[in-house]
Every structure is written in structure tokens, then in C-alpha cells.
Image (tube, helix red, strand yellow):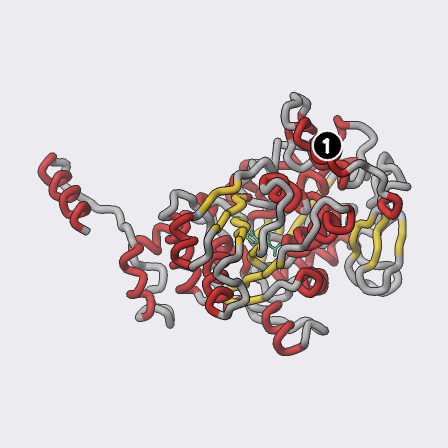
């Protein structure tokens, strides 16, 4: 089978280009593996017309607000609402949308007290249609897959990308192929892909093995890859930052903190911040910091041991399975945005992740373990003095609590660390545990339990 072009025939050729992040080679088309034809590195989307960007910024900001009142599907999408900064569509009906984006920004007063910052906010991307931040990128990339005439889309995933891809493919009348590591993703995520009709393969390897295989597959078969190597995904994920700044009335916070796995999301948010600064939408850059699980700390080691110049691969192991990734594809893009915004990169232990997840949960806001690394990381960054005690911070919560209920149940039952090296240390978390209580069905038993709980 011969490779097909991945540029949408209907997209205006003048609107955007694919540019190599390493050698700067710019083209109107990209091959199916989304690698630079000259040097093989990753591509990003750029907009040549922005050199003479003449839109009135105040008008643009009010246009984005006004679109919220419209009833058209493209305006109701929290992603396409910002379409002026995305690859253009020939007409609005082309977008495959599930009304993604439009996610809330919550105050976390108790977590602010715990960490010692005055104001702590959480941008909850877990409230997207399939329960994770992936939907913001998927609406754009699936749309361009369909425009390019593909019948099949495919991804490697730790679970959330596959759930999202399967949903958008189904909505857009596309077939989807999912490659996930066998036994290492949550059933909730896997069940989403099945329900949305994906052909789902559990491969006897890890995420990195799945992604390697996908990269070979797209060179052999006419399938469109929807991993975050696909630069359209990152364009969609940029809107998280646009919407966040809009919610903050365009006053940048001091810090934005994200979890790091394959490093697509941090790259996308960083790209958005730099573009917003260059276009004059914001006057200063927040520092964008990336937090990884200690057992999946490729970026941390890349920066500490190789000064960000070459990737240090790791054999990934963490109960935060969404970020169980040892060979992150977008590491160079992430290094660039960390340097450009002056952000930090930290790692946190399994115990710290479990504690942070329970603390966020105690505010009535559920998230999955990978999202909780942000709060755990913030505590470290405050201790180190990198985040100062008077600074405002936004945590990006990437996935819903319902994505991994087994983790939450095991934590509250006290089983999460059983048999692991952290078992003894986990006793420190007992105060945060709320295990279910099995009782005889009598009024007395329930009243006694209520009285005991009141005393505790
Ligand atoms: N948080 C969650 C809930 C995720 O699912 C992921 C990645 C990340 C954080 C890390 O984001 O990869 O852009 O650095 N999940 C991918 C997947 C890899 O296949 O669902 P990243």
C-alpha cells in the first residue's frame, strides 16, 4: 500500500505549514509518520500569515466570548471556538465535535493551604466528553484525518488517547485501530474503546513498544496516526491554555503545572503560551512546569543527566498508568517550552501521588492518579523555593476519577501498596483513607457509625 498525503485537500494551503522542530524544513504536506522528510525529527504546525497578524486583539477576545452564545456545534465546542488560531476549515460542518473543552476552573482552597500558596486553581480537563484532555486534540486531528480522505485512524495508548480516538472516529464515520499494552491500562479506558467500536489490540509489550509498532504500521498501511506525534493533536490541545487565560480574564498566572507522559500536552500548552505572547493576547509568560512519576522520569533524567540534549530512556513503572511511558516522543518539544517559559521539571513518588490524589478528592474534585502528580509536584516546587509563597498556581487535571476506580478503591481499602517497597511508608496516609464499612442493616449500627465518624 502506498503512503497517502496527510494534508487535508480542503484545508487552505496558505493557512498553515508543517515545520521540522530540528532543521526548520517547512512543507505544505507531511508523510504518514509525521516525521521531517529531511532529518526525521518531529513536525509542528506554523501559520505563515501570522507574521502580519492584523486582527484586533480586543475584538478577537470578544468574538471568542460571543461564540459561547451561539447554537452552532462548532461554536459550542470549547476548541473550535478558538478556530482563528487553529488550521482553517473550508466550512464549519467539517468539524467532528462532541462539544469538547469548556472545562471548569476550580478553586482548591484546602490544597492551597496544604501547599502554602495563596490561590490554587485546577483546570479540570477530566470533564471533557470522554473524561480526559485528549478530546481537545482529537477533535482537530480526527477532523483533518477525515478531510485527508482516510478510512482508518490508529493510535498507541495508555488508555485515554484510545478512548478519545475511538469516540471521535465513531462520530466521524471512521474506523479505528487501538494498540494498548496488555494488562497495563485501566478497564474503564479499555471499555470506552470497545463501546465506541474500535478494533482493540492488547499487545504483549509496554506503551513504548505499542508506539514503535504503530510508527512502522503507518508506513505500511493507509492508516492515519492519531498519537500526539500528529501535530494537529497539539493544535487542539493548545486551546486548554487559551480557555484558561480567558477564564482568568487574560491575566496570566505565575505557574501552570502539568503531568508529563509522552509530553504532547506540555508541548501544546507551551506552544499556546508562546503564540499568545507573540500575538499580544498576554503580556507575560507563566512558567510551565512538568511533573513525572519517579518510576517514569525520562524527562527529569534527560534534563539532569543530558542537559536536555539527548533523551535518557527509562523502563517505566508506576501505578499512574496513564503516564507509564519511558521513551516520550515529544521530549524535544517539551524541553523547548520548559526553557522558553522558565519552568521546572520534577518527579514524585508513588506515595506522594496517592496522597495528592486523596487531597484533591477531599475537595470534591476527583481526578485520576496521573493528574495528581501536579499537586505532589507543586509541594516540592514550593519547598525548593521555585514557586514562591505569594504566587498564583494553576494545576492541569488531565483525567477524571472515574477513569481508574480500581486505584481509588485499593487506596481507600489500604491495598494499594501491599507487597510493594512503599508498604511501610504508606501507613502515613491512613488518615486520608475512607474505606467502605460493611454493617448489619440495623438503625443502631448506622447511628453508631455516624457517632464514631463525628468524633474522628
Ligand atoms: N494525564 C493523563 C490522564 C494521560 O492520559 C496522559 C497521557 C498524561 C497525563 C500525559 O500527557 O502524554 O501528553 O505528556 N496519556 C496518553 C494516552 C499517553 O495514551 O492516553 P502527555
Residue situated in front as seen by the camera: 50 or 184: 50
Residue situated in front as seen by the camera: 143 or 195: 143
Seen at 53% across and 57% down, the residue is 391
Crowding near pointer 1: few (<14 within 10 Å), some, many (20+)? many
- Residue 96 x/y as whole percent: 69, 32
- The residue at the far top in this view is 71
| Tally of marks | 1
Q: Is residue 329 visible?
A: no
Residue situated in front as seen by the camera: 131 or 334: 334
- The residue at the far front in this view is 390
> Residue 447's image quarter?
top left
Height in image: 456 above or below 15?
below
Seen at 84% across and 46% down, the residue is 47
- Residue 212 x/y as whole percent: 68, 61
- Residue 453 x/y as whole percent: 19, 47
Q: Is residue 434 visible?
A: yes
In the picture of the structure, the residue carrying the numbered disc 1 is 95
> Residue 353's image quarter?
bottom left
Q: Secondary structure at mark 1?
A: loop
Residue situated in front as seen by the camera: 81 or 414: 81
- The residue at the far bottom in this view is 305
Seen at 66% across and 58% down, the residue is 211
Height in image: 375 above or below 143?
below
- Residue 213 x/y as whole percent: 68, 59
Q: Is residue 283 left or right of residue 398?
A: right
Q: Is residue 169 left or right of residue 187?
A: right
Seen at 41% across and 53% down, the residue is 111
Amino acid at each position: 500500500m502506498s503512503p497517502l498525503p496527510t494534508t487535508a485537500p480542503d484545508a487552505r494551503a496558505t493557512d498553515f505549514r508543517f515545520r521540522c522542530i530540528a532543521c526548520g524544513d517547512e512543507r505544505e504536506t507531511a508523510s504518514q509518520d509525521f516525521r521531517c522528510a529531511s532529518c526525521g525529527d518531529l513536525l509542528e504546525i506554523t501559520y505563515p500569515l501570522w507574521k502580519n497578524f492584523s486582527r484586533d486583539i480586543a475584538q478577537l477576545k470578544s468574538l471568542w466570548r460571543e461564540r459561547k452564545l451561539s447554537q452552532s456545534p462548532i461554536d459550542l465546542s470549547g476548541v473550535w471556538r478558538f478556530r482563528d488560531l487553529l488550521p482553517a476549515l473550508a466550512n464549519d460542518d467539517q468539524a467532528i465535535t462532541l462539544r469538547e473543552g469548556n472545562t471548569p476552573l476550580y478553586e482548591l482552597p484546602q490544597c492551597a493551604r496544604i501547599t502554602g500558596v495563596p490561590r490554587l486553581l485546577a483546570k479540570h480537563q477530566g470533564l471533557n466528553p470522554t473524561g480526559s484532555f485528549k478530546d481537545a486534540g482529537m477533535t482537530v486531528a480526527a477532523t483533518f484525518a477525515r478531510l485527508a480522505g482516510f478510512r482508518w485512524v490508529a493510535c498507541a495508548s495508555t488508555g485515554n488517547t484510545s478512548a478519545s480516538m475511538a469516540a471521535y472516529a465513531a462520530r466521524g464515520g471512521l474506523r479505528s485501530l487501538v494498540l494498548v499494552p496488555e494488562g497495563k491500562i485501566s478497564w474503564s479506558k479499555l471499555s470506552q474503546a470497545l463501546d465506541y467500536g474500535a478494533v482493540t489490540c492488547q499487545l504483549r509489550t509496554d506503551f513504548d513498544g505499542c508506539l514503535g509498532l504503530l510508527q512502522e504500521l503507518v508506513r505500511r498501511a493507509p492508516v492515519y496516526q492519531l498519537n500526539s506525534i500528529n501535530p494537529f493533536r497539539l493544535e487542539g490541545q493548545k486551546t486548554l491554555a487559551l480557555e484558561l487565560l480567558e477564564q482568568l480574564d487574560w491575566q496570566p498566572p505565575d505557574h501552570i503545572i502539568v503531568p508529563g507522559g509522552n509530553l504532547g500536552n506540555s508541548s501544546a500548552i507551551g506552544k499556546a503560551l508562546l503564540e499568545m505572547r507573540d500575538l499580544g493576547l498576554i503580556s507575560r509568560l507563566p512558567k510551565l512546569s512538568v511533573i513525572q512519576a519517579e518510576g517514569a522520569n525520562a524527562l527529569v533524567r534527560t534534563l539532569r543527566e543530558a542537559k536536555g540534549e539527548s533523551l535518557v530512556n527509562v523502563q517505566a513503572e508506576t501505578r499512574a498508568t496513564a503516564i507509564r511511558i519511558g521513551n516520550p516522543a515529544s521530549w524535544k518539544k517539551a524541553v523547548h517550552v520548559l526553557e522558553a517559559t522558565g519552568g521546572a521539571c520534577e518527579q514524585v513518588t508513588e506515595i506522594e501521588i496517592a496522597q495528592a490524589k486523596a487531597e484533591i478528592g477531599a475537595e470534591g474534585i476527583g481526578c485520576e492518579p496521573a493528574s495528581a502528580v501536579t499537586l505532589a509536584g507543586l509541594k516540592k516546587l514550593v519547598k525548593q523555593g521555585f514557586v514562591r509563597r505569594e504566587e498564583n498556581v494553576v494545576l492541569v487535571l488531565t483525567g477524571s476519577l472515574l477513569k481508574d476506580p480500581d486505584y481509588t478503591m485499593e487506596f481507600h481499602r489500604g491495598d494499594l501498596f501491599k507487597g510493594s517497597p512503599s508498604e511501610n511508608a504508606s501507613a502515613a496516609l491512613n488518615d486520608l483513607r475512607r474505606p467502605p464499612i460493611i454493617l448489619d442493616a440495623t438503625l443502631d449500627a448506622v447511628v453508631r457509625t455516624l457517632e464514631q465518624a463525628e468524633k474522628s
